[in-house]
Amino acid sequence: MKQQRNIYEENSNSDIKKTRLRRALAKAKPLVALMLEKSIPPKVILSDSIKKESGNSIDNEKVPLEELQVREAISTFLWLGFLFVITILIKVHLDSSPHAAAIGVSKAPWVFGSIQWLLQRLPVWLSGWFIPLLSGAILLTLPWWELKVGQRWARIIFLILSFVWVGLTFLYWFQD
Amino acid sequence: MGKPGFIQHIRPRQLKSGTLQLRNTFCLGGFSFLAFILLTISGVLLLFFYSPGEAAFSSLSEIDSALPYGGLIRSLHFWAGQLMVVSVFLHMVRVVWSKAYKPLRELNWVTGVMLFVLTVVLDYSGYLLRGGQESGAAASVGQTLVKTLPGGHFFSTIFFGQPSSLNGSTLNVFVWHVFILAGIAGFLQIFHFWRIRKDGGVRPL
């Protein structure tokens, strides 16, 4: 009698297990489908409107994020390598101690070399404020300049600004 | 569970292949951001031992000579800063070259120019924090410049505090460099990345 009851309980337990398994499988089906979809390389999707807009439709092909991540990893590695090499090779010295004898003339940091060069030759309001602020304002409004004067002139304006400021930086840094 | 909306927006599962081409970006924006991350990490490490003001030079001297790898971290902070200025400028040149500043991307261009200015000011304030005689001279030039403005004394005190001509490091400059300017730069960069995706990626127009 006891044995019969055990067999009955085992059967009913296995039925419950089977039912649970069936339910779990039914729930898992969409998940499995989703996982399979992720593992397959995504197809190139080209929107018709994009094809019409751009002549170069290859640039609009869809690629997985992993492609970008690999490139990011390689460039990060190279950039960090370069940074560590210059960090190790070129030691950054401390400034002159404030308690030491006062030094004669000190050079401005290279970033401000161009302004320093102008400050040595022109009035402060012009070299320290007007020219830098005007340059900044032109730079900020470059997209709107393009609408007014055209792409070519907008680029020329940017090139002139860049050459002047970079040129002055070099000029200051390499002058005696 | 899906990714949060913002992350999914700047790191979507699929991208346009044009965004991956090296000649479209030269990775310059990414290098600038990488420099910012390194600057943040090395800057936080320096914060544990750096003291602004009178003790600035001696604390840097201690970091440089007595602390294990202190000199290396200080050098790393310095070079990452210089590389960031260069890479942000080159990034701007690239953007103009590839015509990526044009409308509808003008807002991101404005953000980028602001980030360039912030990077330069961060570099300058970092130079002042070195606490030596050279930083004192740089602070004097900056103070004189600001004082020529109407209300210049007020603005000069707010940014520079009371530096001496032999030491440009003050608590004011320290707070601006470490918290305010760096915080604004971090926030603007996140906004910049968000706008890049919003405006259709980094493809040239």
Image: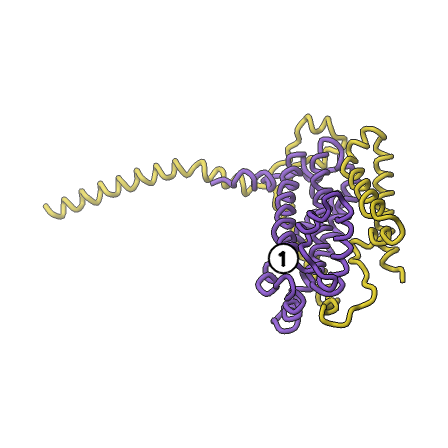
Chain colours: A yellow, B purple
Q: Residue A45 location, x and y as percent?
A: 64, 33
Q: Residue B183 location, x and y as percent?
A: 61, 48
- Left or right: residue B83 versus residue A135 is left
**In the image shown, does B169 or A10 lie closer to the viewer?**
B169
- Left or right: residue A86 versus residue B52 is right
Split into 4 quadrants, where in the image is the C terminus of chain A?
Answer: bottom right
The quadrant where residue A116 appears? bottom right
Q: Residue A94 location, x and y as percent?
A: 72, 68
Which residue is label 1 attached to?
Answer: B171
**In the image shown, does B73 or A174 lie closer to the viewer?**
A174
**In the image shown, does B59 or B191 lie closer to the viewer?**
B59
Badge count = 1
The residue lying at 59 percent from left, 61 percent from top is: B47
Does residue B80 sit above or below A26 in this rendering?
below
Chain bearing tag 1 is B
Does residue B77 sit above or below B6 in this rendering?
below
The residue lying at 76 percent from left, 63 percent from top is: B134
- SS state under label 1: helix
